[in-house]
Image (spheres, rainbow, N blue to C red):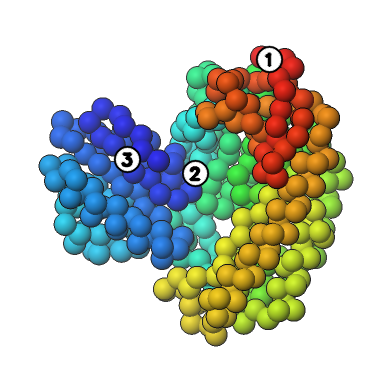
Amino acid sequence: MNAPLRNAEVVSFGCRLNAVESQELVKAHASARETVIVNTCAVTSEATRQARQAIRRLHRERPQAEIVVAGCAARLDPRGFAEIDGVTRVLAEHAPNRALAGIEGTRGLLAVQNGCDHRCTFCIIPFGRGQARSAPPTEALAQARALVAAGKKEIVLTGVDLTSYGVDLGDGWTLGRLVQLLLAELPQLQRLRLSSVDCIEVDDDLIAAFGDDSRLCPHLHLSLQSGDDLILKRMKRRHSRQDAIDFCRALRKARPDIVFGADFIVGFPTETEDMFAGTLDMVDDCGLTHLHVFPFSARPGTPAARMPQVATQIAKARAARLREKGEAALRAHLDALQGRTLRLLTERGGTARAADFTLARTPGVEAGLMIDALCAGHDGRALETRLTAFGR
């Protein structure tokens, strides 16, 4: 994503939190000289390789520009990035402990949490992001007000470990309590959405909020990673298979229209075919609709990289099978919506999203509108719609 502002430009890799931070970096480093800020990601070795490649390409194409490197990969290897030709500065410090707001097309992104205190054996991000820290609720509310004043109909709360919000604040602050505060203080906000969550950390106030206020979008993306208890232990995850199933049941009881997505890593070291079968079954057992599936790729510096590896071709084949099951689940979800009228928030490119994150095609309709549309077919990925009314 490239976002020009004044004399600085940002090239951002990775997550939504990076997207928010990129805008802050541009504001802080715009200068009289042409400046390019490369905000790196370290979630995989490939992401780091792509960032290095982008820096070298930028220097070849724009040798006169200052290149500033930031982000997780830069924090993990500041010397290595500093040695790349064309790099004038590496920002290795952690992001500040405050709320950050950014704009992603028709949505407002609000980063309220950063860092992570957990040490999953496949993940190096905590070393690039530091300890878990939460933005003060007053700051989060102020930034949310600004997004609403700017015309955002939907706000997405994001963070590295979002459901750990409040652990460092005291006074009983949790993500659920923050959500309740935002919904109570911003009656004009039409939608509040959460990014990826850890099911074992979700608090009772958050579950209650799903049942109490329909503006809290009925969609959660879960960091599940596996459906086998032994693999979960070897990943150093804190939930069990049954914990995940029970969580989905509890949320569905509080909010019957909720739709779940999930992240899975397949081919994790020592994973057998029987273990993988347990992950396949999670699609049905949890009632999942949107899957993000990744074949395991060892990240140097993590404990999982030192474990007995599953052959790459086996991991890729399992990923393809899980994606196929996810595609079938999505088709079933889209089938069930046929003939219904949904409220959609339109995006650029002739698409829109329902509150449950279902993708719809809305050709010819400008971005940033709330519309009502009839579900009149689908292509296995997105709804085909017919406009029935414009909302507020």
Q: Is residue 228 left or right of residue 65?
A: right
- Locate the N terminus and report the quarter of the image it occupies: top left
First-in-chain label (2 vs 3): 3
**What is the C-alpha distance between the residues marked 1 and 2?**
29 Å
First-in-chain label (1 vs 3): 3
**Residue found at the very far bottom of the displayed protein:** 308
Q: Which kind of residue does numbered mark 1 sit on?
A: Phe
Q: Is residue 105 left or right of residue 215?
A: left
Q: Which kind of residue does numbered mark 2 sit on?
A: Arg
Residue at position x 81%, y 34% from top?
A: 338
> Label 1's element?
strand
Q: Is residue 94 left or right of residue 241?
A: left
**What is the C-alpha distance between the residues marked 1 and 3?**
35 Å
| Foreground of the two, 346 or 356 | 346
**What is the C-alpha distance between the residues marked 2 and 3?**
14 Å
215 to 334, vertically: above or below: above
Residue at position x 68%, y 50% from top?
A: 290
Place of residue 45 in the rendered image (x, y in percent of width and height, measured from the top left): 41, 65
Decide: marks 2, 3 in contact (CB < 8 A)?
Answer: no
Which residue is label 3 attached to? 10
Residue at position x 25%, y 35% from top?
A: 8
Which residue is label 1 attached to? 390
Marking on residue 16: 2
| Foreground of the two, 199 or 69 | 69
Residue 25, located in which quarter of the rendered image? top left
Place of residue 121 in the rendered image (x, y in percent of width and height, measured from the top left): 54, 72
Residue at position x 82%, y 29% from top?
A: 340
First-in-chain label (1 vs 2): 2
Residue 103 in sight here: yes
